[in-house]
């Protein structure tokens, strides 16, 4: 994943108020034992959250831009850093308008590609006709 790529967390996310609180909690879990290996990951970001339940913040449909993914050598905890990138639309009507605009852009791109393909086919046909005429003249 490259820096600036979009990342969407479509459901609910729960977290702590600071990265230090999250690291303290993950450290309290101890080592993961079992047949399947697991990693401890912190998703670090700043976005609008609702506060409920002691020490927890909640966010729904967090949309962001990827910044980095690093592992602390000592604790072995991974940190995914995400920069907030809120949706451009805020109502269902805005979203529907965006969907229609995106569909129009895709249709225009497909039409342009089809036109380019037709022009290439026409050029190849003309070239074939010219070659046939040359061969007939010989």
Image (cartoon, rainbow, N blue to C red):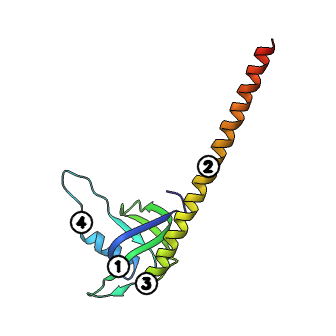
Q: Nearer the viewer, residue 117 or 24?
A: 117
> CA gap, disc 2 to disc 3?
41 Å
Residue at 77 percent of width and 25 percent of height: 130
Residue at 49 percent of width and 56 percent of height: 1
- Percent position (x, y) of residue 112? 64, 52
> CA gap, disc 4 to disc 1?
15 Å
Q: Sequence order check: which comes first, mark 4 or mark 1?
A: 1
Q: Sequence order check: which comes first, mark 2 or mark 3?
A: 3
Residue at which label 4 appears: 30
The reply to whether callout 4 and callout 1 are in contact (CB within 8 Å) is: no
Q: Sequence order check: which comes first, mark 1 or mark 2?
A: 1
Q: Nearer the viewer, mark 4 or mark 2?
A: 2
Label 3: state its secondary structure. Answer: loop
Residue at which label 1 appears: 21
Label 2: state its secondary structure. Answer: helix
Badge 4: residue crowd in 10 Å (few <14, some 14–19, many ≥20): few
Q: Sequence order check: which comes first, mark 4 or mark 3?
A: 4
> CA gap, disc 4 to disc 2?
56 Å
Residue at 52 percent of width and 77 percent of height: 88
Q: Sequence order check: which comes first, mark 1 or mark 3?
A: 1
Residue at 53 percent of width and 58 percent of height: 2
- Percent position (x, y) of residue 73? 41, 59
> CA gap, disc 1 to disc 3?
18 Å
- Percent position (x, y) of residue 79? 42, 66
Residue at which label 3 appears: 48
């Amino acid at each position: 994943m490259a820096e600036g790529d979009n990342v969407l967390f479509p459901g609910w996310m729960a977290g702590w108020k600071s990265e230090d609180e999250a690291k303290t909690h993950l450290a309290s879990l101890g080592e993961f034992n079992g047949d399947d290996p697991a990693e401890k990951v912190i998703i670090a970001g700043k976005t609008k959250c609702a506060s409920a339940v002691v020490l927890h913040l909640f966010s729904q449909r967090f949309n962001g831009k990827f910044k980095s993914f690093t592992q602390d050598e000592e604790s072995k905890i991974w940190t995914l850093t995400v920069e907030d990138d809120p949706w451009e639309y805020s109502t269902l009507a805005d979203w529907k308008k965006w969907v229609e605009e995106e569909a129009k852009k895709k249709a225009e791109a497909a039409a342009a590609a089809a036109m380019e393909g037709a022009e290439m086919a026409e050029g190849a046909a003309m070239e074939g006709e010219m070659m046939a005429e040359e061969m007939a003249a010989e």
